[in-house]
């Protein structure tokens, strides 16, 4: 029996299969094969990663050891990068023991030692290109690479995530800033050596033509959110949280999609055909020009895709209103 979108219990995480397919095709045409190292943190879903792999991308970026181990267990362990730092011996060992080629980011003597001591064999030197998060300063990258090699790690190259530039509104300004940041990464790479220069995200995916970056770590492009939707990128909104109107009062309606079903760090979600007033734990309160009725379905568009995905157990893949698959969000946790 065909399951329709309207049959799902809500809140329900829904992926528009056609928009998703177009997003994957658009990205693969710009960054085919290994030029893209899709970041699974954006979706935490192995069936979705398998769709990216079917587009030709066999190497993946992960943010947590759990993502690495889960990808390996799903047979997608050809080349997994933990683009993040960890000193946890148990999790490092779990990644080392996984059926995968695992590379971890390092930015300190401590992270180098922890990786080498727990069975990891390869690393990238994580370089600070302006985002005050992880990453060694460019002038210390070469010394850290020497240290990593002394411990026996294979230093495959560098990464440098320009996350602070994703939302620079003007494209030419964004391009100039990305090129300046990537000059820092190139200088570090000259001292570090190795094949890989890894950087980038959805907001800068097409700004690396003149940089030395040879793989882009974009993730959000596959599903998108309203935050990235404002940037004029060639990707479509492909994920929604479907809600049911549970109350209708004077000027407003209330649906059952609250902040426990949405990543809220980029602000309120949007409601198709409505204006969101606010979210509370289990509710979104919104106004509409037309009259909505209790029991009606509404499409809520998340402002930030990554944390939204992580709040749901599964996503429903929908084509022409019909549910065609259930994809578990199986890489949650750490
Ligand atoms: C290390 C790293 N690389 C790449 C990305 C790119 O992700 P997105 O495509 O969602 O901008 C992120 C996102 O936070 C990240 O942390």
Image: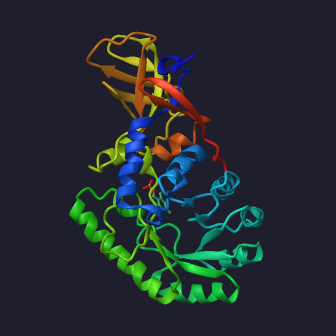
Query: In this rendering, is residue 44 above or below 246?
Result: below
Question: Quick check: can you spot residue 122?
Answer: yes
Q: Residue 80: horizontal and vertical position, in percent?
A: 60, 63
Q: In which quarter of the image is residue 183?
A: bottom left
Numbered marks: total: 0
Query: Residue at (66%, 48%) from the top-left corner?
Result: 333
Q: Residue 190: horizontal and vertical position, in percent?
A: 45, 88
Image quadrant in which the N terminus is located: top right
Q: Residue 266: horizontal and vertical position, in percent?
A: 41, 45
Query: Residue at (50%, 22%) from the top-left corner?
Result: 256
Q: Residue 156: horizontal and vertical position, in percent?
A: 57, 79
224 or 276, nearer to the observer: 224
Query: Residue at (40%, 81%) from the top-left corner?
Result: 186
Query: In this rendering, is residue 127 above or below 6?
Result: below
Query: In this rendering, is residue 153 above or below 266?
Result: below
Question: Quick check: can you spot residue 283?
Answer: no
Query: Residue at (41%, 30%) from the top-left corner?
Result: 300
The type of colouring in the image is rainbow
Q: Is 57 on the left or on the right of 301, as rendered?
A: right
Q: Is 150 on the left or on the right of 89, as rendered?
A: left
36 or 117, nearer to the observer: 36
């Amino acid at each position: 029996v065909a399951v329709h979108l309207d049959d799902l219990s809500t809140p329900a995480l829904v992926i528009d299969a056609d928009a998703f397919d177009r997003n994957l095709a658009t990205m693969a045409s710009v960054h085919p094969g290994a030029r893209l190292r899709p970041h699974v943190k954006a979706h935490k879903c192995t069936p979705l990663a398998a769709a990216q792999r079917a587009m030709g991308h066999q190497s993946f970026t992960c943010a947590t050891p759990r993502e690495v181990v889960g990808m390996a267990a799903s047979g997608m362990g050809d080349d997994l990068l933990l683009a993040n730092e960890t000193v946890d011996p148990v999790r490092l060992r779990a990644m080392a023991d996984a059926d995968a080629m695992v590379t971890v980011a390092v930015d300190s003597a401590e992270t180098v030692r922890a990786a080498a001591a727990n069975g990891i064999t390869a690393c990238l030197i994580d370089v600070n290109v302006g985002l005050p998060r992880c990453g060694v300063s460019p002038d210390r990258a070469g010394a850290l690479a020497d240290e990593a090699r002394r411990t026996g790690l294979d230093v495959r190259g560098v990464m440098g995530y320009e996350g602070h530039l994703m939302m620079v509104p003007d494209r030419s300004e964004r391009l100039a800033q990305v090129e300046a940041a990537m000059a820092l990464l190139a200088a570090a790479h000259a001292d570090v050596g190795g094949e890989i220069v890894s950087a980038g995200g959805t907001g800068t995916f097409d700004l690396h033509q003149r940089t030395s970056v040879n793989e882009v770590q974009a993730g959000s492009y596959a599903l998108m959110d309203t935050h990235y939707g404002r940037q004029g990128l060639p990707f479509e909104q492909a994920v929604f949280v479907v809600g049911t109107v549970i109350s209708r009062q004077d000027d407003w309606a209330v649906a059952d999609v609250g902040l426990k079903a949405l990543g809220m760090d980029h602000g309120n979600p949007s409601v198709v055909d409505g204006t969101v007033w606010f979210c509370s734990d289990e509710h979104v309160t919104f106004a509409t020009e037309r009259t909505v009725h209790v029991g009606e379905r509404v499409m809520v568009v998340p402002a930030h895709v990554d944390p939204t995905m992580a709040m749901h157990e599964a996503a429903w893949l929908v084509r022409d209103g019909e549910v065609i698959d259930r994809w578990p969000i199986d890489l949650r946790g750490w």
